[in-house]
Amino acid sequence: MTLIVGLGNPTKQYERTRHNAGFLAIDNMIDRVKPAAVAKSSFKGELFKAGDLLLLKPTTFMNLSGESVQAVQSYYKPEKTIVIHDDLDLPFGALRFKRGGSSGGHNGLKSIDAAIGADYLRVRMGIGRPSVCAATIDYVLGRWSSDEEAHLDDLVLAAATAALQLVTDPLEMVQTTRTLKGV
């Protein structure tokens, strides 16, 4: 069994923000895989299941994502966990894949690391950095620019496809830096 977690914040207020890139990838997979919803409030998230695939959108808000991941892991005991998240250190449109590592200051990853350890696969979706005068929190919780929106569906599709490939293929087959054309 494989658990794929998309990081983001619940509520309409955060729906189309950079910090919700992981949620967008999970939504893309839900549209493609057509899993069944799993209703269990102790999971603290929206969980979907299709065969041996679990798709999770924590509803704990980003800083407490580990609570949701830990609850689902404790119940289903997946062999593999993949986390999809936004990454300030990558330019918009870049994707990177790795196992473990530091949180890089990402509060969702910090929470997951504290709850289950850092040994899980990561799909890092590049959102770029704010201009020098913009605050990081305002940037990640801000909406995509019109230029980013024009390429966002491609980025989301690429991240979702890569995460699904990681379900069956080893990291080394997927582990490259990818950048969307035209971005």
Image (spheres, rainbow, N blue to C red):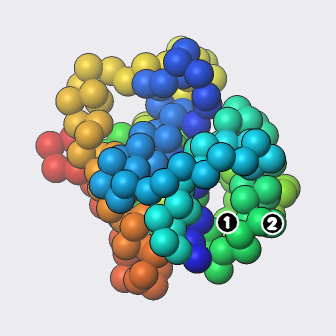
Q: Quadrant of residue 105?
A: top right
Residue 167 location (% of width, % of height): 46, 75
Categorize mark 1 by other alpha carbons within 10 Å: few (<14), some (14-19), many (20+).
few
> Is residue 18 found left or right of 34 in the rendered image?
right
Determine whether the residue tagged by mark 1 lies in a helix, strand or loop. Answer: loop
> Is residue 112 found left or right of 49 in the rendered image?
right
Q: Residue at x 33, y 21 (%)?
A: 145
Q: Which residue is mark 1?
A: 101
Q: Residue at x 79, y 56 (%)?
A: 71
Could you tell me the amino acid type at mark 2?
Ser
Nearer-the-camera pick, 147 or 26: 26
Establish if 36 lies above or below 16: below
Residue 154 location (% of width, % of height): 24, 45
Q: Which residue is mark 2?
A: 74
Categorize mark 2 by other alpha carbons within 10 Å: few (<14), some (14-19), many (20+).
few
Determine whether the residue tagged by mark 2 lies in a helix, strand or loop. Answer: helix
Residue 89 location (% of width, % of height): 51, 46
Residue 14 location (% of width, % of height): 54, 22
Q: Quadrant of residue 3?
A: bottom right
Q: Residue at x 65, y 80 (%)?
A: 79
